[in-house]
Amino acid sequence: MIKYDEDLLITGSEDGLIRAVSVLPNKIVSILGDAVDQEDEGFHIQKVTLSHDKCLLASCSPDDIIKIIDVSHLGSLAKFDFDEEAYEQSV
C-alpha cells in the first residue's frame, strides 16, 4: 500500500489487482492494473512504489517480475464512480 495523495491510496494484493482507493468516502476509485497472467494463474503483488512525479507505478511479485503502470490520469479519476461489478463481468 502506498499513499498517492491526501485522498487516495494505491493497494496491491494477492489477487493480482492494483486498486486506487479513496479514503473518505471509503470506495474503490479504479483498478489500475490486472496482473493476472493467463498462463500463470496469478501475479501476487508484493510491493508497489510511485515515481517521484507520481506518473508511474511499479509493482513487483515474489518471482521478481516488475510491472510499470502509467498512473498520471489518476487524479482526474477520483471524481468518477467506479463500478466494480461491471469490471468483474468484463474480465
Image: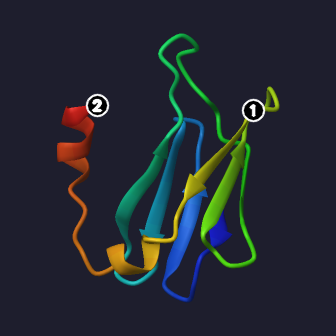
The residue tagged 1 is: 65
Image quarter (top left, top right, bottom left or bottom right) of the C terminus: top left
Residue name at image x 35 percent, y 67 percent: 29
Q: Tell me residue 23's x, y (percent).
A: 46, 79
Secondary structure under tag 2 reads loop
Q: Classify mark 1: residues with Cα within 10 Å, few (<14), some (14-19) or many (20+).
A: few
Residue at far bottom of view: 6
48 up-or-down from 21: above or below: above
Q: Classify mark 2: residues with Cα within 10 Å, few (<14), some (14-19) or many (20+).
A: few
Question: On the rendered structure, is 41 left or right of 82?
Answer: right
Tell me how many marks there are.
Answer: 2
Residue at far top of view: 39
The CA distance from mark 2 to mark 1 is 22 Å
> Which mark identifies residue 91?
2
Q: Hey, which quadrant is residue 13 in on the image?
A: top right
Q: Tell me residue 81's x, y (percent).
A: 22, 70
Three-letter amino acid code at disc 1?
Ile
Residue name at image x 56 percent, y 64 percent: 10
> Which mark identifies residue 78?
none
Please name whichever residue, 38 or 22, is drawn nearer the observer in this view of the structure.
Answer: 38
Residue name at image x 47 percent, y 16 percent: 38
Three-letter amino acid code at disc 2?
Val
